[in-house]
Amino acid sequence: MDRRKLVTLTNLCMITKGDKILVIDRQKKDWPGFTFPGGHVEDDESIVDSVIREVKEETGLNIQNPKLCGVKDWVNSDGSRYIVFLYTCNTFTGDIISSNEGNVSWIKREDFLKLKLSVDMDVLIRVFEDPDITEFYYQKINEEWNIHLK
């Protein structure tokens, strides 16, 4: 039995500075709204190196020692799997700059849920903040995507 599956690897990073978090207002039509910086893991790149690179490209910040706090994952209709490695970080250098990915800004954590968030970021934030939750899993049941936090 062949157990190999096509897997897409990506990352997101919640960067904190005191009582503030860094958000990006994505302009992509397929994923608009406020979220955290992140992106795809390139060929022959470590997952940690990918989150460091993506944060630099999207925000201008050089992060150090990002901490893996969980994963977001789902199985697509073709059987492939999509995995998002979730990181937190509070150590960085540089000044924020916006990119073609969207406008970047610091907001107070208490204001996060008031923003027009990207899909399911209001639930995903729990994985970043609750050490007892390490997985956000989408499961498709009867054409509906259901969220399971584990």
Image (spheres, rainbow, N blue to C red):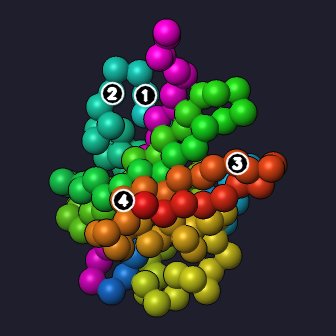
From the image, state whether disc 4 or disc 2 is nearer to you.
4
| Vertical position of residue 44 compared to residue 143: above or below | above
Instruction: Specify few, some or many for label 4: CA neighbours under 10 Å numbering under 14, 14-19, or 20 or more.
Output: some
Q: Where is 12 relative to 2, above or below?
A: below
| First in sequence: mark 4 vs mark 2 | 2
**Residue on which disc 2 sits:** 45
Residue sitting at x 34%, y 73%: 130
Residue 140: which numbered mark, if any? 3
- Give the class, few, some or many, for how many residues have Cα within 10 Å of label 2's Cα (few <14, many ≥20): few
Magenta segment boundaries in residue numbering: 1-18
Looking at the rendered structure, the kind of residue marked 2 is Glu
Give the mark, 3 or 1, whose residue is nearer the N terminus.
1
**Element at badge 2?**
loop
Q: Earlier in the sequence, mark 3 or mark 2?
A: 2
List x then y, in percent, for residue 112: 52, 81
Q: Which residue occupies 42% across, 56% down?
A: 135
Q: Which residue is mark 1?
A: 42
| Callout 1 touching callout 2 (CB < 8 Å) | yes
Q: With respect to residue 48, does 79 lie above or below?
A: above
Q: Nearer the viewer, residue 105 or 5?
A: 5
Distance from label 3 to label 1 (Cα)?
28 Å
Answer with mark 1 or mark 4, whichever residue precedes in sequence. Answer: 1
**Distance in Å between CA atoms under marks 1 and 2:** 5 Å
Q: Secondary structure at mark 1?
A: loop
- Quadrant position of residue 86: bottom left
**Structural distance between the alpha carbons of marks 4 and 2:** 23 Å
- The circle on residue 134 is 4
